[in-house]
Image (cartoon, rainbow, N blue to C red):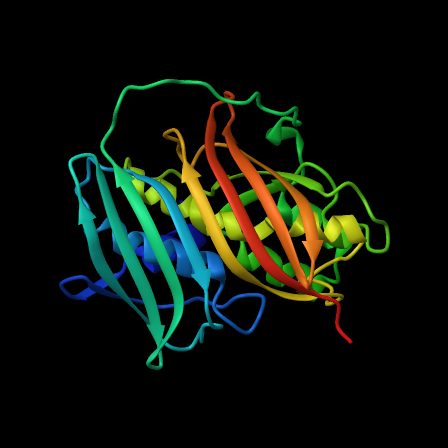
Amino acid sequence: MNQALDALLDLLDLEQIEENIFRGVSRSALVPRVFGGQVAAQALVAAGRTVPGDRPAHSLHAYFLRAGDAGAPIVYTVDRIRDGRSFTTRRVVAVQHGQPIFHLSASFQTYEEGLEHQAAMPDAPDPETLPTAAEMLPRHLPEPVAQRLIEARAAVDLRYADVPPWGTVGQPREPRSQVWFRTHGKLADDSLLHVCLATYVSDMTLLDSVLLAHGRGGWAVGDVVGASLDHAMWFHRPFRADEWLLYDQESPSASGGRGLGQARIWTQDGRLAVTVIQEGVVRVPR
């Protein structure tokens, strides 16, 4: 396990300061605010720690309300909405400087047998044949920007199946993007941890497909400004975040200064593990 992954796991190991109240810290991000995937993952950790271990998360719905201050702790308060026979529901509010910055609702379920079907996994190149971030990013970005991006994602081995948005600026493409990802090291057998790490990674690239449709390079090159607005995930089947996962992403729409990304996450052996939808602000600077 590398130091960056150790630091990320420490980030997700929230301090419990009272019953149903947890405190987390932040790490530096590419933009001068808390990374949205971090807040979402920490909020899910807080919710999950109030739920029996035999009830894994099956969905979350969240809103990003205000930009987070990376220099201040975040307090997560958990509201135990419902504890049913099969389902458990939690609501989490993340607070900084006396104001809510993020709101999450999450549902957990006991394991059940039931009807089973799934869509077919799309074609994708073998992740082992793709360049690493350290190999690929310097080809398309200035060295300081590439290095910051590499450091920000150092806990995760994230490999693009095609050239990312900042590599084809000015060339509109099909609004679809694929990345493979896994953590840089093995993880404990804790289903909540794997779900939270996938939540963390899910906010890294989901709006790339919006940028591709318009030939924009994104936050890395500064030709758009943006932020996540809301985020939803459905966890269909068990998976491990320390094994290769295919993140197949597309954008069906952009309008009104907003862009929508939708995606599916697949295990390498073809099981549909997660569905993700996010809308974000995507504005062209004046």
Is 101 on the left or on the right of 125, as rendered? left
Question: From where the camera sits, is residue 241 visible?
Answer: no
Question: From where the camera sits, is residue 171 visible?
Answer: yes
Residue 112 is situated, as x and y percent measured from the top left of the image, at 25, 24
Is 240 on the left or on the right of 284, as rendered? left
Is 87 on the left or on the right of 247, as rendered? left
Quadrant location of the N terminus in the rendered image: top left
Residue 18 is situated, as x and y percent measured from the top left of the image, at 14, 67
> Is 264 drawn above or below residue 41 in the view shown?
above
Task: Between residue 93 and residue 17, name the one nearer to us.
Answer: 93
> Is 37 drawn above or below residue 119 in the view shown?
below
Tell me the residue at 35%/81% (across/down): 97
Tell me the residue at 75%/72% (across/down): 285
> Is 265 drawn above or below residue 145 in the view shown?
above
Residue 258 is situated, as x and y percent measured from the top left of the image, at 65, 60
Count up the numbered dots. Answer: 0
Quadrant housing residue 162 = top right
Task: Between residue 209 and residue 7, name the one nearer to us.
Answer: 209
Quadrant location of the C terminus in the rendered image: bottom right
Tell me the residue at 72%/65% (across/down): 224
Residue 83 is situated, as x and y percent measured from the top left of the image, at 16, 45
Is 80 on the left or on the right of 168, as rendered? left
Tell me the residue at 38%/77% (across/down): 72
| Residue lying furthest right | 170
